[in-house]
Image (cartoon, grey):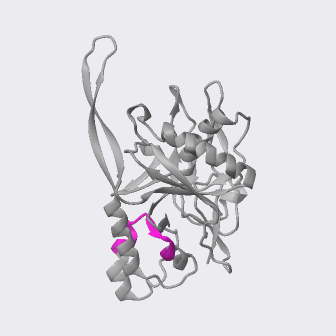
Amino acid sequence: MYAVKLKIHSPVHIGKEGLGMEESFVSIHSDTLYSAIYSAWQELFPFEGELPFKISSAYPYIENTFFFPKPSLPAPGFEDAEKRDTYAKDVKKTPFVDMDTFQSWINARIIDFESMKENNRRLKSAIGNTVRPRVALDRISSASSLYFIGEVLFDKKRDCGLYFLVDSDLENWEKLQRVMLHLGETGIGGERSSGYGRFTPSYVDTFPLPTAETGDKYLTLSLLLPSSKEEAQQAYSYRIIKRGGWSKDTLHKQVYMFTEGSVFSAPVEGKTVIVADVGHPVYRYGRSFMVKAR
Protein backbone atom coordinates (compact mmCIF):
# COMPACT_ATOMS: atom_id res chain seq x y z
CA MET A 1 0.00 0.00 0.00
CA TYR A 2 1.21 3.54 -0.80
CA ALA A 3 1.10 6.40 1.70
CA VAL A 4 1.71 10.15 1.57
CA LYS A 5 3.05 11.96 4.64
CA LEU A 6 2.39 15.70 4.99
CA LYS A 7 5.01 17.45 7.09
CA ILE A 8 3.03 20.59 7.89
CA HIS A 9 4.92 23.87 8.33
CA SER A 10 2.15 26.39 8.98
CA PRO A 11 -1.18 26.52 10.80
CA VAL A 12 -4.01 24.65 9.12
CA HIS A 13 -7.58 25.92 8.90
CA ILE A 14 -10.33 23.70 7.54
CA GLY A 15 -14.00 24.40 8.21
CA LYS A 16 -15.89 22.24 10.67
CA GLU A 17 -17.55 20.24 7.90
CA GLY A 18 -14.14 19.19 6.59
CA LEU A 19 -12.23 18.73 9.81
CA GLY A 20 -12.53 16.10 12.49
CA MET A 21 -11.18 17.66 15.69
CA GLU A 22 -11.38 16.66 19.34
CA GLU A 23 -9.13 18.27 21.92
CA SER A 24 -5.78 18.53 20.10
CA PHE A 25 -6.41 15.68 17.66
CA VAL A 26 -7.05 16.40 14.01
CA SER A 27 -7.81 14.58 10.76
CA ILE A 28 -8.94 15.57 7.29
CA HIS A 29 -11.90 13.63 5.95
CA SER A 30 -11.36 11.79 2.67
CA ASP A 31 -13.93 13.87 0.77
CA THR A 32 -12.19 17.14 1.70
CA LEU A 33 -8.78 15.68 0.87
CA TYR A 34 -10.09 14.34 -2.45
CA SER A 35 -11.43 17.77 -3.45
CA ALA A 36 -8.07 19.44 -2.75
CA ILE A 37 -6.17 16.79 -4.73
CA TYR A 38 -8.72 16.93 -7.56
CA SER A 39 -8.28 20.69 -8.04
CA ALA A 40 -4.48 20.42 -8.00
CA TRP A 41 -4.55 17.43 -10.36
CA GLN A 42 -6.66 19.35 -12.86
CA GLU A 43 -4.02 22.08 -12.98
CA LEU A 44 -1.27 19.60 -13.90
CA PHE A 45 -3.13 16.79 -15.69
CA PRO A 46 -6.52 18.07 -16.96
CA PHE A 47 -9.10 15.31 -17.38
CA GLU A 48 -12.79 14.52 -16.95
CA GLY A 49 -14.37 12.21 -14.43
CA GLU A 50 -13.09 10.84 -11.12
CA LEU A 51 -9.50 10.55 -9.99
CA PRO A 52 -8.02 7.15 -10.98
CA PHE A 53 -7.24 5.89 -7.46
CA LYS A 54 -8.72 5.54 -3.98
CA ILE A 55 -7.60 7.34 -0.83
CA SER A 56 -8.22 7.12 2.89
CA SER A 57 -8.82 10.06 5.17
CA ALA A 58 -5.70 11.81 6.50
CA TYR A 59 -4.72 10.87 10.05
CA PRO A 60 -2.01 12.18 12.38
CA TYR A 61 1.44 10.73 12.70
CA ILE A 62 4.32 11.57 15.01
CA GLU A 63 7.76 10.29 14.04
CA ASN A 64 7.30 6.54 13.33
CA THR A 65 3.92 6.21 15.04
CA PHE A 66 0.90 6.28 12.72
CA PHE A 67 -2.63 6.73 14.02
CA PHE A 68 -5.87 5.18 12.77
CA PRO A 69 -9.55 5.83 13.48
CA LYS A 70 -10.94 4.15 16.57
CA PRO A 71 -12.85 1.06 15.37
CA SER A 72 -16.61 0.95 15.93
CA LEU A 73 -16.19 -2.39 17.70
CA PRO A 74 -16.09 -3.30 21.42
CA ALA A 75 -12.61 -2.79 22.86
CA PRO A 76 -10.95 -6.21 23.37
CA GLY A 77 -10.13 -6.77 27.02
CA PHE A 78 -13.08 -4.82 28.39
CA GLU A 79 -14.60 -8.12 29.52
CA ASP A 80 -12.27 -7.58 32.48
CA ALA A 81 -14.18 -5.21 34.80
CA GLU A 82 -10.98 -3.78 36.28
CA LYS A 83 -9.58 -2.89 32.84
CA ARG A 84 -12.91 -1.40 31.83
CA ASP A 85 -13.10 0.78 34.93
CA THR A 86 -9.49 1.92 34.52
CA TYR A 87 -9.42 2.70 30.81
CA ALA A 88 -13.02 3.24 29.64
CA LYS A 89 -12.76 7.05 29.77
CA ASP A 90 -9.49 7.05 27.81
CA VAL A 91 -10.97 4.83 25.11
CA LYS A 92 -14.19 6.83 24.91
CA LYS A 93 -12.59 10.26 24.50
CA THR A 94 -9.94 9.43 21.91
CA PRO A 95 -10.88 9.44 18.20
CA PHE A 96 -7.59 7.80 17.14
CA VAL A 97 -5.40 4.91 18.22
CA ASP A 98 -1.83 4.02 17.26
CA MET A 99 -1.14 1.30 14.69
CA ASP A 100 -0.32 -1.45 17.24
CA THR A 101 -3.52 -0.76 19.17
CA PHE A 102 -5.51 -0.67 15.92
CA GLN A 103 -4.00 -3.98 14.79
CA SER A 104 -4.88 -5.64 18.11
CA TRP A 105 -8.38 -4.12 18.09
CA ILE A 106 -9.37 -5.35 14.61
CA ASN A 107 -7.95 -8.81 15.40
CA ALA A 108 -9.90 -8.98 18.69
CA ARG A 109 -6.67 -9.29 20.69
CA ILE A 110 -6.31 -7.74 24.14
CA ILE A 111 -5.08 -4.15 23.87
CA ASP A 112 -2.09 -2.68 25.66
CA PHE A 113 -4.06 0.25 27.06
CA GLU A 114 -1.07 1.83 28.80
CA SER A 115 0.82 1.98 25.52
CA MET A 116 -2.27 3.45 23.85
CA LYS A 117 -2.46 6.18 26.52
CA GLU A 118 1.23 7.02 26.15
CA ASN A 119 1.04 7.33 22.37
CA ASN A 120 -2.03 9.56 22.62
CA ARG A 121 -0.20 11.71 25.17
CA ARG A 122 2.72 12.10 22.73
CA LEU A 123 0.34 13.03 19.95
CA LYS A 124 -1.48 15.58 22.06
CA SER A 125 1.83 17.22 22.97
CA ALA A 126 2.80 17.53 19.28
CA ILE A 127 -0.48 18.77 17.78
CA GLY A 128 -2.64 21.50 19.27
CA ASN A 129 -5.34 23.96 18.25
CA THR A 130 -6.05 27.57 18.99
CA VAL A 131 -8.28 30.43 17.85
CA ARG A 132 -6.76 33.54 16.27
CA PRO A 133 -8.64 36.87 16.07
CA ARG A 134 -8.82 38.48 12.63
CA VAL A 135 -10.25 41.77 11.31
CA ALA A 136 -12.26 42.17 8.09
CA LEU A 137 -12.75 45.56 6.39
CA ASP A 138 -15.90 46.43 4.46
CA ARG A 139 -14.98 47.22 0.84
CA ILE A 140 -17.24 50.28 0.67
CA SER A 141 -17.37 51.80 4.15
CA SER A 142 -14.04 50.45 5.43
CA ALA A 143 -15.87 49.51 8.64
CA SER A 144 -14.05 46.80 10.55
CA SER A 145 -15.48 43.64 12.04
CA LEU A 146 -13.80 41.11 14.29
CA TYR A 147 -13.93 37.38 13.56
CA PHE A 148 -12.00 34.33 14.67
CA ILE A 149 -10.10 31.63 12.78
CA GLY A 150 -9.54 28.18 14.23
CA GLU A 151 -6.00 26.89 13.71
CA VAL A 152 -4.38 23.50 14.10
CA LEU A 153 -0.69 23.80 14.98
CA PHE A 154 2.01 21.16 14.50
CA ASP A 155 5.24 21.12 16.51
CA LYS A 156 7.89 22.27 14.03
CA LYS A 157 10.69 20.73 16.12
CA ARG A 158 9.25 17.24 15.72
CA ASP A 159 8.49 15.03 12.76
CA CYS A 160 4.71 15.16 12.91
CA GLY A 161 1.84 15.90 10.57
CA LEU A 162 -0.84 14.03 8.68
CA TYR A 163 -0.70 11.03 6.35
CA PHE A 164 -3.13 9.23 4.07
CA LEU A 165 -3.17 5.91 2.23
CA VAL A 166 -3.42 5.47 -1.54
CA ASP A 167 -4.63 2.50 -3.61
CA SER A 168 -3.27 3.17 -7.09
CA ASP A 169 -1.34 1.77 -10.02
CA LEU A 170 2.28 2.86 -10.41
CA GLU A 171 1.69 5.41 -13.18
CA ASN A 172 -0.90 7.38 -11.25
CA TRP A 173 1.06 7.03 -8.00
CA GLU A 174 3.97 8.82 -9.70
CA LYS A 175 1.61 11.52 -10.99
CA LEU A 176 0.15 11.94 -7.51
CA GLN A 177 3.61 12.66 -6.13
CA ARG A 178 3.96 15.60 -8.53
CA VAL A 179 0.47 16.81 -7.61
CA MET A 180 1.24 16.70 -3.88
CA LEU A 181 4.40 18.77 -4.37
CA HIS A 182 2.27 21.40 -6.11
CA LEU A 183 -0.44 21.22 -3.43
CA GLY A 184 2.15 21.58 -0.69
CA GLU A 185 3.26 24.91 -2.13
CA THR A 186 -0.27 26.29 -2.51
CA GLY A 187 -1.57 24.84 0.76
CA ILE A 188 -4.53 22.78 1.88
CA GLY A 189 -7.63 24.04 3.67
CA GLY A 190 -8.82 27.60 4.18
CA GLU A 191 -6.95 30.91 4.51
CA ARG A 192 -4.27 29.78 2.02
CA SER A 193 -3.71 33.39 0.89
CA SER A 194 -2.54 34.06 4.45
CA GLY A 195 0.01 31.24 4.30
CA TYR A 196 -2.07 28.53 5.94
CA GLY A 197 -1.85 24.83 5.11
CA ARG A 198 1.68 24.66 3.66
CA PHE A 199 3.39 21.28 3.81
CA THR A 200 6.21 19.17 2.40
CA PRO A 201 5.12 15.73 1.19
CA SER A 202 7.10 12.53 1.45
CA TYR A 203 6.15 9.13 0.10
CA VAL A 204 5.99 5.57 1.41
CA ASP A 205 5.99 2.92 -1.32
CA THR A 206 5.33 -0.05 0.97
CA PHE A 207 3.12 0.96 3.87
CA PRO A 208 2.31 -2.01 6.19
CA LEU A 209 -1.47 -1.75 6.25
CA PRO A 210 -2.96 -3.42 9.36
CA THR A 211 -5.61 -6.06 8.71
CA ALA A 212 -7.20 -9.21 10.12
CA GLU A 213 -6.47 -11.97 7.62
CA THR A 214 -9.19 -14.23 9.04
CA GLY A 215 -11.65 -11.40 9.57
CA ASP A 216 -15.23 -11.63 8.36
CA LYS A 217 -15.99 -7.92 8.80
CA TYR A 218 -14.71 -4.82 7.01
CA LEU A 219 -13.70 -1.46 8.47
CA THR A 220 -13.50 1.69 6.36
CA LEU A 221 -10.59 4.13 6.65
CA SER A 222 -12.45 6.74 4.59
CA LEU A 223 -15.87 8.32 4.70
CA LEU A 224 -18.30 6.07 2.85
CA LEU A 225 -21.38 6.88 0.82
CA PRO A 226 -23.20 3.64 -0.07
CA SER A 227 -23.88 3.11 -3.76
CA SER A 228 -27.12 1.23 -3.09
CA LYS A 229 -29.61 0.24 -0.41
CA GLU A 230 -28.00 -3.19 -0.35
CA GLU A 231 -24.61 -1.69 0.52
CA ALA A 232 -26.13 0.41 3.30
CA GLN A 233 -27.73 -2.71 4.77
CA GLN A 234 -24.27 -4.25 5.24
CA ALA A 235 -23.52 -1.72 8.02
CA TYR A 236 -22.70 -3.64 11.19
CA SER A 237 -21.46 -1.04 13.70
CA TYR A 238 -21.13 2.55 12.60
CA ARG A 239 -21.39 6.29 13.05
CA ILE A 240 -23.04 8.75 10.64
CA ILE A 241 -21.96 12.26 9.66
CA LYS A 242 -23.72 14.93 7.54
CA ARG A 243 -21.49 16.49 4.89
CA GLY A 244 -22.04 19.75 3.03
CA GLY A 245 -20.21 22.89 1.97
CA TRP A 246 -19.99 25.78 -0.49
CA SER A 247 -18.28 26.49 -3.83
CA LYS A 248 -18.36 29.97 -5.35
CA ASP A 249 -21.42 30.95 -3.26
CA THR A 250 -23.19 27.76 -4.33
CA LEU A 251 -24.50 25.50 -1.57
CA HIS A 252 -23.60 21.84 -1.99
CA LYS A 253 -26.23 19.14 -1.77
CA GLN A 254 -25.94 17.62 1.70
CA VAL A 255 -25.40 13.89 2.11
CA TYR A 256 -25.16 11.51 5.06
CA MET A 257 -22.09 9.29 5.14
CA PHE A 258 -20.61 6.54 7.29
CA THR A 259 -17.62 7.81 9.26
CA GLU A 260 -14.13 6.41 9.36
CA GLY A 261 -13.92 3.37 11.65
CA SER A 262 -17.42 2.15 10.70
CA VAL A 263 -17.68 -1.62 10.28
CA PHE A 264 -19.59 -3.61 7.65
CA SER A 265 -20.57 -7.27 7.37
CA ALA A 266 -19.34 -7.48 3.75
CA PRO A 267 -17.06 -5.41 1.51
CA VAL A 268 -18.82 -2.39 0.00
CA GLU A 269 -17.53 -0.05 -2.68
CA GLY A 270 -19.32 3.24 -2.04
CA LYS A 271 -19.64 5.94 -4.67
CA THR A 272 -18.73 9.50 -5.64
CA VAL A 273 -21.60 11.89 -6.37
CA ILE A 274 -21.93 15.36 -7.91
CA VAL A 275 -23.20 17.78 -5.22
CA ALA A 276 -23.01 21.09 -7.13
CA ASP A 277 -22.31 22.62 -10.54
CA VAL A 278 -20.29 25.85 -10.64
CA GLY A 279 -19.39 25.70 -14.32
CA HIS A 280 -17.85 22.32 -13.62
CA PRO A 281 -19.08 19.44 -11.46
CA VAL A 282 -18.25 19.44 -7.74
CA TYR A 283 -17.71 15.90 -6.46
CA ARG A 284 -18.37 14.43 -3.02
CA TYR A 285 -15.98 11.49 -2.67
CA GLY A 286 -17.56 8.56 -0.86
CA ARG A 287 -15.62 5.46 -1.90
CA SER A 288 -14.55 2.97 0.73
CA PHE A 289 -11.00 2.19 1.79
CA MET A 290 -11.41 -1.05 3.69
CA VAL A 291 -9.41 -3.41 5.88
CA LYS A 292 -10.62 -6.72 7.32
CA ALA A 293 -11.65 -6.98 10.97
CA ARG A 294 -12.86 -9.73 13.28
Front in this rendered view, residue 228 or 103: 103
Q: Answer with left or right where residue 10 lies relative to residue 164.
A: left
The x and y percentages for residue 150 are 33, 43
Segment colored magenta = 89-101
Residue 96 part of the magenta-drawn span = yes
Q: Does residue 87 lie above or below 4 as drawn?
A: below
Residue drawn at point x = 50 percent, y = 25 percent:
249
Q: Answer with left or right where residue 53 lies relative to residue 120.
A: right
Residue 146 part of the magenta-drawn span = no
Q: Does residue 268 lie above or below 193 as drawn?
A: below
Residue drawn at point x = 44 percent, y = 37 percent:
190
Residue 127 location, quadrant: bottom left
The x and y percentages for residue 31 are 57, 47
The x and y percentages for residue 175 are 68, 46
Residue drawn at point x = 52 percent, y = 40 percent:
244
Front in this rendered view, residue 172 or 243: 172
